[in-house]
Image: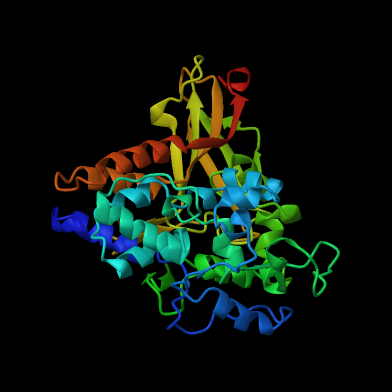
Amino acid sequence: MASGNGVVKWIVTALTLTLAACGPDPRSPPLPSSPATAPADHESFLKRHWARPLAPQGAPPAGFGPQEASLAPAACGQCHAQQFEDWQTALHSKAMGPGLVGQLQEMDAGAVDDHQACLRCHAPLAEQQADLQQTLAASGAVSARADGAAFTHGLTCAGCHVRQNQRFGPARRDGSSPAAGSALPHAGWQVSAAFEDSRFCAACHQFEPDGFSLNGKLLENTYEEWRASRYGRDNQNCQSCHMPDRRHLWRGIHDPEMVRSGLAIEFAAPSIAAGGVTAALTIASRGVGHAFPTYVTPQVIVEIGQAGEDGALLAETVERHLIARDVSLDLSEERSDTRILPDEVRRYAYDRPLAPNAATLVARIRVEPDAFYAEFYRATLRDPDFSKGREALSAALRQAEGSNYVLYESRRELNLSKDG
């Protein structure tokens, strides 16, 4: 770890051990139970499939050509073009972004347990672990590799689909499996319906029951939030929303259209009486199968305020509301939890004096997907002893700040209905 002041060292350690350590440890209890409609044998498959750290693939079978033997996503993309194209646009392909790379560059090459706290979900292949160790031992400088072993490739096709050079996946769309003895590339694939079980995702998106908690709630609890919702009760799995039509997209809080598709937002016309303005903005979680947002890193800001003729908000008229699980930077305190649960309807009322120069009433919803990370990067970069990963963390901060967007905005006229 960096040798800087105690506060920043604690922050780096806390993030490494909690924000990145997303999946179940092989020494931990079994994966969380699934709805009764999911076959029980999925659990044994998933326990083997996600036994971290993953074992090395070993030497490929003698009959494999270079493309079949490769773990590189681009090699998979030679035949699975659509999946590869989708993956390239998804955050899974960027799971080892500059934020994590910058932190890893501050670690010793032999700190395998510390590496695994990140890699176990963000770059889980044993070959990626070896690449990281070699990189840190050499100079810490990150270089590109085309053989699939690069830890910077993030969560690759092989990270989910390849174990000991065998390919695993769901049945074909028509429910069929490869026939025994079929002459298929890389000897075909082993079929498991567990790829369509939400517990497959829980391996990295759910802390164990005894995992890190604040205020009695696990820091990452997405699977259990889903399981407690009507989506979980109906076994409408994670993949049905995040992998529609089997697309390898995994859209989430960073994607405005995905977020809009899960919410119903209404902003009624304001009323003006006795020199005051009243209005209400309503947000209904109609298609989000877990808390909105599910994790501690994003924040959503609701703003309602009056604007002048130039369209700019008048600061003294603005009311702001936070939708987030707001935690302290050192992860020692949950300051508030104002997230919206599945099927919940949240109403934000507005009641303020009418400003003399107000022309419109504005309702705006802003999303900052990486708010916590941005705060963490700023704090770490203030530490002069954080040196090796400074360039990467600076790039991560720029990315985090650039991920913000306006989810919703509506303007209602005021000037035509002002009373005397």
Spot the residue most to the right. Answer: 174
Q: Quadrant of the C terminus?
A: top right
x, y (%) of residue 290?
59, 62
State the residue in front, 240 or 389.
389
Q: Residue at x 48, y 85 (%)?
A: 29
Q: Position of residue 402 (x, y in %)?
A: 44, 35
Q: Residue at x 43, y 72 (%)?
A: 53
Residue 193 is situated, as x and y percent measured from the top left of the image, at 72, 73
Indicate whether 132 appears above or below 358: below
Between 286 and 242, the residue placed more toward the observer is: 242
| Rendered residue at 51%/14% (across/down) | 309
Q: Is residue 194 left or right of residue 332?
A: right
Query: Which of these two is toward me, 246 or 207?
Result: 246
Look at the image and tell me whether residue 288 can be seen: yes
Residue at 70% from the left image edge and 50% from the top image edge: 79
Q: How many marks?
A: 0
Outermost residue to the top: 309
Q: Is residue 56 left or right of residue 89?
A: left
Examine the rendering and report whether any part of residue 230 can be seen.
no
Quarter of the figure with the N terminus = bottom left
- Name the foreground residue: 47 vs 80: 80
* Quarter location, residue 137: bottom left
Q: Residue 141: percent from the left, percent from the top?
A: 30, 45
